[in-house]
Each structure stands twice: as structure tokens, then as C-alpha cells.
Image (cartoon, rainbow, N blue to C red):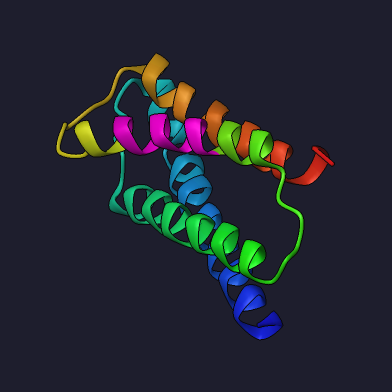
Amino acid sequence: MDVLIHLCVGLHIIGIASLLGGFLTQLKAMGQGTARFVPAMLHGAFTMLVTGVALVGLNQADDQPVDNVKIGVKLALLIVILGLVYVKRDDETVDKRLFALVGLFTTANIFIAVLWT
């Protein structure tokens, strides 16, 4: 079970790296008002959702404690991120505020994962 949990954690980290990396590559374009949601951001957010749900299930199946409030907050942020990226994925440009919100929520999700104990 531990190997499966660690595999999901690794894939979860790859998802967040894809989402944050896609955001960071568009920062210069955001300053110019031409930022867009790249496919890596959508795929990263979806990977995070799938692996996050799997991690909760695997940890509960392994009788490890799960902080449901923390998971709920992270899930709520991720659903907003995924919704924005999915709806605006085909737009040529995205409003700076929406793009910045996705970056802010992504960063918040990382800090919640690391600092909320």
C-alpha cells in the first residue's frame, strides 16, 4: 500500500508542477495582457484532482488519519482552478485578474499542503 501511496504523491506533485509551471511560463505575457491558459495547466489541475482523490481513499483504506477540513479547502480551491482553466482554455487571452487568481489559488494550495498540520 505504501508504494501505491508514494506513487500517487509523486503524480500529485507532477500535476502541481505542471499547473504552476504553465502559470509561470505565462507571467511575462500576463504583464502584457496576452496571457492564456496553456494545456499543461488543465492537465496538471486534472491530474491533481484524480491523484488527490486517490490519495484520500488510499490513506483511509490504510487506516491513516485524514484531515477532512484541509482536504475540503484544497479541493474547493482546486475546483475553482479547474473550472476557470477549463472554461477559458480556448480563449486567446485571459483577463489578468482571472489569470492571477489561478496563480494565487495554486500557490495557496501548495502552502496549505505543506504548512497545514
Q: Position of residue 12 (x, y in %)?
A: 55, 61
Does 102 sit left or right of 5 as displayed?
left
The image quarter containing residue 99 is top left
Return the x and y of residue 10 as percentages of the image width and height: 61, 71
In this rendering, would 99 be left or right of 67? left
How many numbered discs sit on the rendered protein? 0
Q: Is residue 92 left or right of residue 4?
A: left
Q: Which is the main secondary structure of the residues drawn in magenta?
A: helix
> Would you say residue 16 sits in the magenta stretch?
no
User: Is residue 78 magenta-colored?
Assistant: yes
Q: Is residue 107 visible?
A: no
Q: Residue at x 64, y 62 (%)?
A: 60
* Looking at the image, residue 106 lies above or below residue 12: above
Which residue appears at 36% of the width and 55% of the height? 40
Q: Is residue 102 above or below residue 3?
A: above
Q: Quadrant of the C terminus?
A: top right
- Which residue is pictured at 52% across the width and 46% down the height? 20
Q: Which residues are magenta?
A: 75-84
Q: Considering depth in this image, is 115 or 16 the residue closer to the camera?
A: 115
Query: In the figure, is residue 33 to the left or right of 72?
Result: left
Could you say which is closer to the camera, residue 96 or residue 108?
A: 108
Residue 111 is situated, as x and y percent measured from the top left of the image, at 72, 38
Q: In which quadrant of the rendered image does the N terminus lie?
A: bottom right
Visible in this render: residue 26? yes
> Where is residue 35 shown, x and y percent of the image?
33, 31
Q: Is residue 115 above or below residue 47?
A: above
Q: Nearer the viewer, residue 89 or 115?
A: 115
Q: Which residue corresponds to the image point at 23% horizontal and 27% vertical from the top-left? A: 93
